[in-house]
Image (cartoon, rainbow, N blue to C red):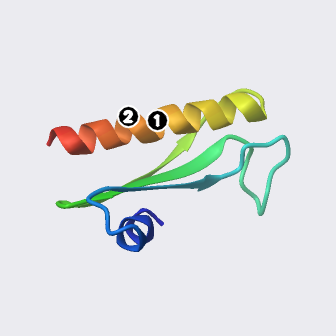
Amino acid sequence: MAEGARAACSATWGLGRTGVAGPDAVDGLAPGTVCLGVAGPDGTISLQERFDGDRAEVRRQTVVRAFDLLSQAWAR
C-alpha cells in the first residue's frame, strides 16, 4: 500500500495503513490490530502493531505511529 501510494503520487515517500480500529474483530483480527508501511528511496518498512483503546484512540495511535515510522525512515 505504501509503495502504491508513493508510485501513484510520484512521491519520494509513501505511507500505508490498514487494520481493525474496532469495536469488533474483523476476519479473526482483534480490535487494535494495525499494519503500517513506509516506502522511500531506500526501500520499504512494514510492521504490525496492536493498540489499546476505543476506535478513536486506535485511529489516533495509528496516525502517530505512522508518522513516527516515517520520521525514523527519513533520518536514515
| Neighbours of disc 2 within 10 Å: few (<14), some (14-19), many (20+) | few
| Nearer to the camera, 55 or 11 | 11
Identify the mark at residue 68; answer none if there is no mark.
2
In the image, 75: left or right of 5? left
On the image, numbered disc 1 is attached to which residue? Answer: 65
Please say if 6 is above or below 55.
below
| Image location (x, y in percent) of residue 28 | 76, 59
| Neighbours of disc 1 within 10 Å: few (<14), some (14-19), many (20+) | some
The alpha-carbon separation of the residues under discs 1 and 2 comes to 5 Å
Identify the mark at residue 42; answer none if there is no mark.
none
Please say if 57 is above or below 31.
above
Q: What residue type is labelled 1?
A: Arg
For the image, the number of numbered tags is: 2
Q: Residue furthest right?
A: 24
| Image location (x, y in percent) of residue 39 | 32, 59
Q: In which quarter of the image is residue 52?
A: top right
In the image, 15: left or right of 71? right
Q: In which quarter of the image is residue 37?
A: bottom left
Q: Residue at x 48, y 66 (%)?
A: 1
Where, quadrant-wise, is the C terminus in this rendering? top left
> Do residues under tags 1 and 2 come within 8 Å of each other at their CB atoms?
yes
| Image location (x, y in percent) of residue 24 | 85, 46
In the image, 76: left or right of 73? left
| Image location (x, y in percent) of residue 5 | 44, 65
In the image, 48: left or right of 31? left
Q: What element carries label 1?
A: helix
Q: In which quarter of the image is residue 60?
A: top right
Q: Is mark 2 on a helix, strand or loop?
A: helix
Q: What residue type is labelled 2?
A: Asp
Q: Which residue is drawn at 36% across and 72% down?
A: 7
Q: Which residue is drawn at 71% across and 54% down?
A: 29
Q: Which residue lies furthest to the left in this view?
A: 76
